[in-house]
Image: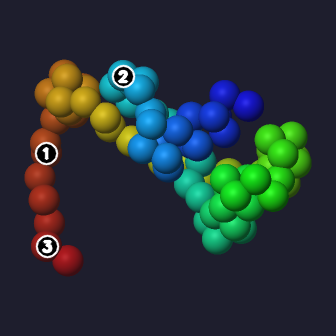
Amino acid sequence: MQWLDFISACRAGTDTTDYDLVIGGIANDRVILTLDLYFAGELTQEQALGLLKYEKPNIQYCIRSEKMLKECLTYIRSEQL
């Protein structure tokens, strides 16, 4: 439930957390549809979480602070594709 609350706050522009890094699932089309129904009040939190738990997980990393960039990442190189 914490995840859904966090995602809801981020999408509404009301997130007040100060996380340096957020790691979580990437929303595919089905996830977006479920979240949109939840945000519109057409699904309860329990219904939305029930639908989302069967999605194949794929993970994304979101760096949210300059501190994280400077202290934890090192530029190695770039390649033109």
Q: Secondary structure at mark 3?
A: loop
**Cα gap from disc 2 to disc 1, whole angstroms:** 27 Å
Quarter of the image where the C terminus is located: bottom left
Whether residue 22 is visible to the viewer of this picture, yes or no, is yes
Residue 9, x across and y down, in percent? 52, 38
Residue at screen point 16% across, 35% down: 74
Residue type, numbered disc 2: Asp
In the rendered structure, the answer to whether residue 32 lies left or right of residue 38 reads left
Residue type, numbered disc 1: Ile
Name the mark on residue 18: 2
In the rendered structure, the answer to whether residue 24 lies left or right of residue 22 reads right
**Depth check: 40 or 3 in front?**
40
The residue that mark 1 highlights is 76
**Depth check: 42 or 34 in front?**
42
Q: Height in image: 81 above or below 47?
A: below
Whether residue 61 is visible to the viewer of this picture, yes or no, is no
User: In the rendered structure, which disc, 2 or 1, sits on the residue that comes first in sequence?
Assistant: 2
Q: Height in image: 56 above or below 62?
A: below
Q: Secondary structure at mark 2?
A: loop
Residue type, numbered disc 3: Gln
Quarter of image, res 80: bottom left
